[in-house]
Amino acid sequence: MRELVILSGKGGTGKTSITAAFASLAKNMVLCDADVDAADLHLILNPDFKETMEFKGGHEAVINPDLCTQCGRCMEVCRFGAVRDSFEIDPIDCEGCGVCVDLCPEHAIDFPQTVSGQWYISDTRFGPMVHARLGIAQENSGKLVSLIRTEAKKLAAKNNLDLILTDGPPGIGCPVIASMGQATAILIVAEPTVSGLHDMERVGRLSKHFNIPAMVCINKYDLNPDQAQKIEDLAQKADIAVTGRINFDPAFTEAMIQTKTIFEYNPGSQAAKEVRQIWDRVLSLPVFNTPATPILNHL
Amino acid sequence: MIISVASGKGGTGKTTVSTNLALSIGQGVQLFDCDVEEPNAHLFLHPSIHKIEPVIAPVPKIDLEKCSFCKKCMDICRFGALAVLKKNVLVFENLCHSCGGCFEICPEHAVLEKERSLGDIEHGTVNGISFIDGRLAIGQVMVPPIIKKIRSYTDPNMITLIDAPPGTSCPVIAAMNKADFILLVTEPTPFGLHDLKLAVETVKILGIPCGLVINRVGIGNDAVNQYAKKENIPVLMEIPFDKKIAQIYSRGEMIVDKIPEYKDKFLDLFKKIVALVEKKEGSK
């Protein structure tokens, strides 16, 4: 089974529009939306929700006022400043470490498991999809990303599908690390701006750190062809395979408004042609046909 | 006054708005780039950096001579960062949240605190603006402590502008929490609207007043405006979609330098924010 994870470092470069476009082209595939903070792939794919599951990510400390003697031990041991002067725990500041729970001499602190999101198995017109919604202001997004990727693999195995297409989150932190571990390869969607270059370089270094082969494509390259060239030069130096360029095309937004992929909205467009070329290169590059080096997936 | 510039969706123009707003106000502003996974503000402002400060977090180090292998440290750790074996204790530093539970619980005082580097913060200045940004080290995951470190330099006598990371989870909360105002930057597309709704829910949980900047007006539809009207969220500024602006941004240049009339627009935005914050404080 192979898994391609679409990443970018910088947000808003076109990850989701390009993932949806690839979904139009791919065969025998499961889709996975790993941007659990701000998932958008469903807005194009309009999934038919088949199963909804709760995600229990962590625990939250709650002081029982009937048992609390206000001795202050919890305030002393909490390193996150989450215990208010009124001996209540601020759920926003609480890290869920449970240290106060274990060290309270009165056993006055409960530690209920919190439902911090939901995840779904759905059908789309391109194949099954696993996606999720992390609750607002919740932690453990990395855990939820790992969970839905595991579920996507199970679903693929069950249905004899050999490809997982994963739309990743922006950044280089916890959810991004969770989205790339053990992937066959990542494709970085970069934009030809100074930020795009800077952020692509950091996500490229992250993939190297975890030994995941990386590729890059440049979206909206004609906004600044010089910057696009710089990205490709940097990619070559960093051992990141260059797979192509896509011109700036408002059709991506127009397609999105009609809940369509670029291939459904305007298959004859220049941008559609360029996305198809990139997809063919992704599938044919040796990097994507080499099994991934397994790493300890500890998030 | 603390103004946090946030968005939900990435790439809507948070950095554009926060850097141009900072330059327009000038003297008396602190700009904190709290998107520590991908900090970009420095690429536009080119501040002269006078100090780089590491951000460290304590992680356990076990004194095996004192350790009785009682496993209490492993039991209290909710993050699976410790594994007590027969004659050894393994510490998985990347899983540690630095909660200090193992130090507190160890009956033998065999858990020592060691420092681990999460990243750096940089202090600089540009055009009278005091600038700080943070940078998560590659492979590290603990973002909130870096944001908290940056925000520990908040000067209550200055205007503090925070360039927040995208999303709605813990890093965003760390960059929004205890702000006086949250400026949400969005774009008029289905993705922009969907993620704006998530950001508005986040702001509601925190109970902070907010307003909108709609960027790239003209590329999508007017659903964002309709939503804002329905939810009673003031639209404080609209920036049209203009290839010229996109190209200015792509080169790392400032809109207020290249199209000077934007300086007044950003100052007008700032005035509107101040008025909303004062109104909120007046109503308390």
Image: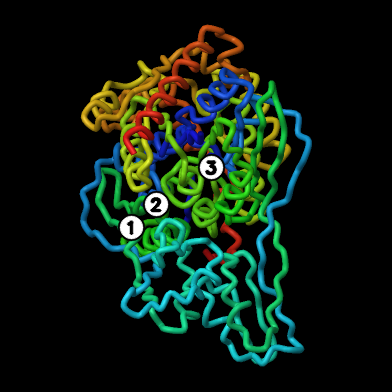
What secondary structure is found at the residue carrying circle 3?
Answer: strand
Label 2 chain ID: A
Label 1 chain ID: A
2 and 1 marks on the same chain: yes
Q: Do the residues labelled 1 and 3 touch (CB within 8 Å)?
A: no
Label 3 chain ID: A
Q: What residue type is labelled 3?
A: Leu
2 and 3 marks on the same chain: yes
A54 relative position to A184: left or right: left
Residue wearing tag 1 = A117
Badge 3 density bin: few <14, some 14–19, many ≥20, Cα 10 Å: many
Residue at position x 54%, y 74% in the image: B80
Q: How far apart are marks 2 and 3 (CA)?
A: 29 Å
Residue wearing tag 2 = A137
Q: Answer with mark 2 or mark 1, whichever residue precedes in sequence.
A: 1
Q: Which amino acid does label 1 sit on?
A: Gly
Q: Do the residues labelled 2 and 1 touch (CB within 8 Å)?
A: no
Residue at position x 41%, y 32% in the image: B184
Front residue of B80 and A4: B80
A249 relative position to B21: left or right: left
Q: Which amino acid does label 2 sit on?
A: Ala
Residue wearing tag 3 = A187
Q: Is residue A172 in view?
A: yes
